[in-house]
Amino acid sequence: MPTRTARTAWNGSLETGQGQVELSSSKLGTYDVSFPKRAADDANGATSPEELLAAAHSACYAMQFSAVLGAAGGTVEALDVRADVSLGPDPEGGFRLTGIALRVRGEVTGIDAATFLLAATDAKNTCPVSKALTGVEITLDAALEE
């Protein structure tokens, strides 16, 4: 399996510095990062490690859930997956990820709502990104749409 790479160039202090994160493997883009924008309610044109983790988690979960649903006999028409990654103070100092909320809505034929919910939980537990983030509480809100 391949290794994927991203690179960040940073200048300055935490409070006044800024950087750019580059998606090196895909060459899809370079994005601004700064701590003041990371900690603000409005990202104002900059990304953050939390947003990048949210993107990775939602994409990974969608792939894993699709595989689990297929193994359960379902046919995936559409999945809409959202991941909200929260940053907050760490009681031991500094900051930490305080939680990840996964939300999925799916259009799947060939299974019932109970099977959908079981598959959703299984995918949450077996998604490689979920496994990597075991130190963070991950919640799941899943619903089969008809």
Image (cartoon, rainbow, N blue to C red):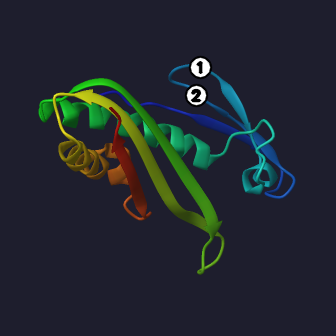
Query: Residue 93 — which label?
Result: none
Q: Is residue 97 above or below residue 131?
A: below
Q: What residue sits right under mark 2 in the picture?
A: 23
Q: Determine whether the residue tagged by mark 2 lies in a helix, strand or loop.
A: loop
Q: Residue at x 76, y 53 (%)?
A: 41
For the N terminus, the quadrant is: top left
- The residue under label 1 is 28
Left/right placement of residue 117 relative to residue 26 reads left
Among all residues in the image, which is located at the extreme top?
27
Sequence-earlier tag: 1 or 2: 2
User: Residue at the right extreme?
Assistant: 16
Looking at the picture, how far across and down is residue 102, in whole percent? 44, 49
The quadrant of the rendering that contains the C terminus is top left
The location of residue 5, given as percent across then percent down, is: 50, 32
Relative to the observer, which residue lies in front, 100 or 140? 140
Q: Is residue 55 left or right of residue 15?
A: left
> CB under 8 Å between callouts 1 and 2?
yes
Q: Which of the two residues, 15 or 128, is positioned nearer the viewer here?
A: 128
Q: Nearer the viewer, residue 120 or 12?
A: 120
The amino acid on which the numbered mark 2 sits, given as a three-letter code, is Leu
Q: From the viewer's perspective, is residue 138 above or below residue 105? A: below
Instruction: Kindly state the secondary structure of the residue where label 1 is placed.
Output: loop
Left or right placement of residue 54 versus residue 113 in this view:
right
Residue at 57% of width from left, 41% of height from top? 52
Residue 139 at what x, y percent from top left? Answer: 41, 58
Q: Is residue 89 above or below residue 136?
A: below
Q: Residue at coordinates 58% horizontally, 28% vertically from top-left?
A: 23
